[in-house]
């Protein structure tokens, strides 16, 4: 593609006359992947400065270099244009989108942001769209579906160039829609600035990633950028029950659908235009019955997910699919077959087991609270069965959900969890406080300690646990032993939650030399092995 076409109308100046024709056959930010004809984006990252590798890129055949340094010169012996922009992240995202054929002009794209619920909501949208035979791709924390294959993901929101490349493949393979998880890091770093996102979804905002954002104000502002980027004919779908809902749409130019959970159906107060409501009619360990009201009318369906927050995830997924063109009938057909993404309250025990075991990705105090309260709410006789549900006005009040007790457990709630190393330390004592407040038995362990000492992380967690409640506490730094302890010690009817790692299949720890190493570790695999041993013990 002609370089002049790629940069036309953008905030880019060049060191060579615009009459010179330069053909671009690739775009990359990694000098090691430069090939003849590449546009090398020499920007400063968190670990390295791309400007240090311009000569390497030129030697490999780069056709042009994009930088934010006006003083950068062409390496001696080479005649390649140097492009300058004061906003390289945004400009490179727009260039990538052009290079790959402006794929988001050919796709109905939804972007989901929030502290918790992004993975589940995008996964539900993806399922509903595809079950309605509207081929939909997905880019998120758990998987990537680019239309040609479904593969494990290694990043919530990839860099801009990789994003547009994947979206281009979706168009080539016949996709008509795409759904993306959009992280606060990606929004702050302008990775999605080149995309046309038609539907934006805000799930919630709670304390997390403050090691990066420093303040909640900056964190909220980063999330809100998604809704500033939506076009006037787009749709913003907002969790009205969240305190940051208003902040999210301050700069929004498009229509807004406000989603809320009702404590109970209210026939005398029908939803108004722009409102979407969900009511949990019935709940059990295997799923819940929902009534959802919105511009589609009223939908009643049973979905195999549990928890108040999953009721909101389903409601927002329904609203997003409706905004993307699905009919009420198509949505109704897809709801009963929905599944949660791997590691999101994933049930790993068999029906024949005498205890229930779930694996969940909850790794912040708010997500851990939501997870534990959701499960506690369907254990008959527990105090937390009176779950706190919010009305559409946002006021919280305790409401006892109708429970199906046919297969529901009747025991105690266990949680096994830790906190990641080299990450936000402020949430560690808060997670300890949440766990000890809700669960009957708490096992504190490791969760990707990275370069930190696991025992030091555990000590930070214990700060949030009052000493007079530590009779409910077990500390086992080795995560496999912690899981085994919980599953072996649980009594018939108990529920065990393995929180923090979810879908992850590695444990990241110190290599003893200042770096890290990854070893295979899968909570669900460990749990299934412990459950099998428990079955054999019961049968012997």
Image (cartoon, helix red, strand yellow):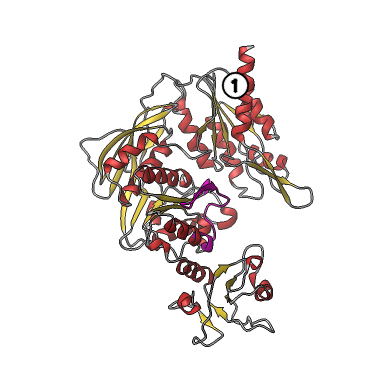
- The residue positioned 40% from the left and 47% from the top of the image is 242
Horizontal side, residue 378 vs residue 64: left or right? left
Which of 529 and 214 lies nearest the eye of the viewer? 529
Q: Is residue 155 magenta?
A: yes
Bin the neighbour count of mark 1 within 10 Å (Cα to Cα): few under 14, some 14-19, many 20 and up.
some
Q: How many marks?
A: 1
The C terminus lies in quadrant: top right
Where residue 128 sits in the image (x, y, percent)?
A: 37, 43
Which of 305 and 332 lies nearest the eye of the viewer? 332
Extreme left residue here?
Answer: 268
Where residue 348 sits in the image (x, y, percent)?
A: 54, 29
Q: Quadrant of residue 54?
A: bottom right
Q: Secondary structure at mark 1?
A: loop
- The residue positioned 61% from the left and 35% from the top of the image is 523
Q: Is residue 331 above or below residue 144?
A: above
Horizontal side, residue 80 vs residue 334: left or right? right
Extreme right residue here?
Answer: 513
Where residue 170 sits in the image (x, y, percent)?
A: 44, 56
Chain part drawn in magenta: 141-163
Residue denoted by label 1? 490
Question: Does residue 214 show up?
Answer: no
Where residue 143 sits in the image (x, y, percent)?
A: 52, 47
Question: Does residue 384 show up?
Answer: yes
Q: Is residue 262 above or below residue 134?
A: above
Horizontal side, residue 500 vs residue 390: left or right? right
């Amino acid at each position: 593609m002609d370089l002049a076409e790629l940069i036309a109308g953008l905030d880019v100046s060049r060191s060579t006359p615009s009459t010179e024709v330069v053909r671009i056959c690739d775009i990359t930010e990694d000098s090691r992947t430069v090939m003849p004809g590449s546009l090398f984006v020499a920007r400063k990252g968190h670990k390295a400065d791309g400007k240090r590798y311009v000569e390497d890129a030129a030697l490999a055949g780069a056709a042009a270099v994009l930088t934010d340094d006006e003083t950068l010169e062409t390496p001696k012996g080479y005649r390649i244009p140097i492009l300058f922009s004061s906003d390289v992240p945004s400009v490179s995202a727009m260039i990538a989108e052009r290079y790959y054929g402006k794929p988001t002009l050919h796709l109905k794209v939804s972007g989901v942001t929030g502290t918790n619920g992004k993975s589940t909501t995008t996964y539900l949208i993806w399922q509903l769209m595809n079950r309605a035979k509207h081929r939909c791709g997905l880019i998120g924390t758990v998987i990537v579906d680019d239309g040609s294959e479904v593969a494990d993901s290694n990043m919530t929101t990839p860099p801009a160039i990789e994003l547009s490349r994947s979206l281009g493949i979706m168009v080539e393979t016949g996709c008509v829609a795409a759904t993306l998880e959009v992280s606060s890091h990606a929004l702050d770093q302008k990775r999605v600035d080149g995309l046309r996102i038609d539907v934006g979804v805000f799930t919630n905002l709670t304390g997390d990633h403050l090691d990066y954002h420093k303040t909640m104000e900056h964190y909220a502002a980063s999330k809100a950028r998604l809704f500033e980027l939506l076009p006037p004919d787009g749709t913003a779908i907002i969790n009205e029950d969240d305190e940051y809902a208003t902040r999210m749409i301050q700069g929004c130019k498009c229509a807004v659908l406000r989603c809320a959970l009702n404590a109970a159906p209210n026939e005398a107060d029908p939803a108004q235009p722009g409102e979407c409501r969900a009511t949990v009619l019935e709940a059990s360990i295997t799923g819940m019955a929902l009534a959802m009201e919105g511009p589609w009318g009223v939908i009643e369906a049973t979905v195999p997910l549990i928890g108040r927050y999953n009721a909101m995830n389903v409601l927002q997924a329904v609203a997003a699919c409706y905004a993307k063109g699905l009919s009420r009938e198509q949505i109704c057909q897809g709801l009963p077959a929905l599944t949660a993404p791997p590691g999101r309250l994933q049930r790993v025990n068999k029906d024949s087991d005498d205890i229930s075991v779930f694996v969940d990705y909850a790794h912040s105090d708010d997500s851990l609270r939501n997870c534990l309260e959701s499960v506690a709410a369907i254990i008959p006789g527990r105090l937390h069965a009176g779950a706190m549900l919010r009305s559409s006005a946002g006021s919280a009040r305790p409401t006892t959900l109708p429970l199906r007790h046919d297969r529901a457990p009747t025991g105690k709630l266990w949680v096994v969890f830790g906190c990641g190393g080299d990450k936000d330390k402020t949430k560690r004592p808060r997670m300890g406080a949440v766990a000890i407040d809700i669960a009957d038995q708490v096992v504190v362990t490791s969760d990707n300690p990275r370069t930190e000492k696991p025992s030091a992380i555990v000590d930070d967690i214990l700060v949030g646990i009052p000493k007079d409640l530590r009779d409910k506490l077990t500390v086992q730094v080795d995560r496999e032993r912690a899981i085994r302890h919980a599953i072996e010690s649980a009594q018939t009817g108990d529920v065990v939650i393995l929180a923090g790692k979810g879908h992850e299949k590695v444990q990241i720890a110190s290599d003893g030399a200042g770096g890290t190493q990854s070893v295979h570790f899968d909570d669900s695999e460990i749990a299934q092995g412990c459950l099998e041993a428990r079955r054999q013990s019961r049968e012997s």
